[in-house]
Amino acid sequence: MSKNCIYLVGLGPGNPSDIPERNLEILRATDLVFLRTSSHPSVARLVAEGVKFTSFDYLYESLDTFEQVYDAIAREVINRADESNVAYAVPGHPLVLERSVAVIISQCPKERLIVMPAMSFLDAVIGALNLYDLGTIQLVDSCCLDAEVINPSRPVLLTQIYSRLVAGTVKLDLMRIYPDDHPITVVSAAGIEGQERVAHVKLYELDRLEVDHLTTAYVPPILEHKVGNVTPLIRVVEELRSEHGCPWDKEQTHKTLSRYLIEEAYETTEAIELEDMHKLCEELGDLLLQIVLHVQIASETRAFTFSDVVRGITEKMIRRHPHVFGDATAHDSAEVLAKWEKIKARERDSGWGRSLMDDIPKFWPSLMSAEKVQRIASAVGFDWTDMDGVLDKVAEEIKELEHATRNGKRQCVEEEIGDLLFTIVNLSRFLSVDPELALKKSIRKFIRRFKRMEREANAAGKNIEALSIDELDLLWEQAKKEDT
């Protein structure tokens, strides 16, 4: 055995039989054995094996904070290691959420430390809760809980809920960011045969349960129980793209599907404008199908999964709504939009050469692009002070268009038409009107009235293409009256 070493010994999650035999050998052979706490089921095995030890339980009773306890433990262990070898035994694995060990490691030369691993409490909890996808899980010591750093779009494991007082404090902290009735799972004595208990409760019920130092709570993401209905659709699309699936679906790529994504988005918009809820429900389903198809294609190359998509947009929504999920305030929609743009700006690459305009999609409809450009400019203060200025600009652009038309310069006419349309979009923005939707409605209105003209002409036994402009004007005025 090495001289003056500190053995950091794991005792396993609770079952006395889970203590590794080599760890027991170290504890038997070391003169100075310290336990962080004797309040752990595995300690019964040490007593049965005749291991002599000193517990630091008295520090929990005499000191005010856990940090003071851990600092005192580290000092004692390190100082006593100057005399002889020391074994410091802790529940679970010594490197898994064991703050006292972390303090010792930070204050002692690495060459004097020997880690004796064991099964961690986390292994037992994972087994009890049947957890998977641990890459996104947040491990939090309940005694050091800071609700401000909890991300509610990712799962959380809260450890050491050792009393109802702690459970009550944890509950109140979590209820600042989760619904009161958010479902949680509480496991006690995980992995200990005959003692393990698992309870599925609401968040507000946490401090009503019997808890102890072996109690851990699993808090699922806020959206986990709300997106479950998407799973059958994901499975259907997986099957369509499988070896024995549909030949057409298997041939699709992101590029071949892009046109359908646009089509479904426009059909969904049409259903909204028509206020047809049955059609809207159907079109939203078609739009969701396109999203799931793209995600499935991406998942086949391990680019990303549906969980990544949901997690990403959830985190973005929380990040960009500090007035809802944080301490910021926003009194109206205008202030919300201004804060939104500022947050987006901070998220962008701040390097030289990066423009605020670089994120505008190149394939957006022109009216949408114009409005987006103007909103970005407005966010940095480059905007009209009131609508009168915009109206004056509209009049100015019309005069410039008239001048270009009289001069007969085609390129100038095209440019002035563009400037006029751009200014009209500005006017729409000041009037809180969506120019894209407004123009679509005008187009549909024109089509509707023109069809009335065609019907009237046909009823009179005439071909609309053969009518004079005066006759067409009469039919138009009549169609307008009937369409009001």
Image (spheres, rainbow, N blue to C red):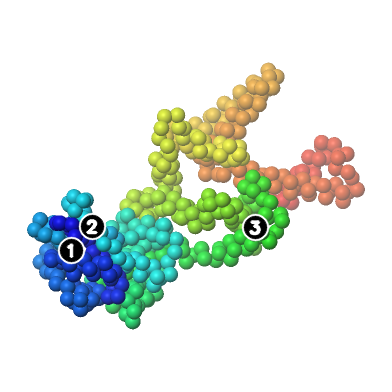
Mark 1 → mark 2, Cα distance in angstroms: 9 Å
The quarter holding residue 466 reads top right
State whether residue 112 appears in this view: yes
278 left or right, relative to 428: right
Q: Decide which of 209, 66 is in the foreground and name it.
A: 66
Q: Where is residue 224 in the image (x, y as percent from the top left)?
A: 46, 64
State whether residue 211 appears in this view: no
Badge 3, how many Cα within 10 Å: few under 14, some, many 20+?
Answer: many
What residue type is disc 1 on? Ala
Q: Classify 212 as above or below 103.
A: below
89 left or right, relative to 224: left
The residue under label 1 is: 87
What residue type is disc 2 on? Ile
40 left or right, relative to 179: left
Q: Where is residue 476 in the image (x, y as percent from the top left)?
A: 77, 43
What residue type is disc 3 on? Arg
Mark 3 → mark 1, Cα distance in angstroms: 57 Å
The residue under label 2 is: 114
Q: Residue at x 19, y 60 (%)?
A: 1
Q: Where is residue 371 in the image (x, y as percent from the top left)?
A: 54, 38
Q: Residue at x 59, y 29 (%)?
A: 419
The mark found on residue 241 in the picture is: 3
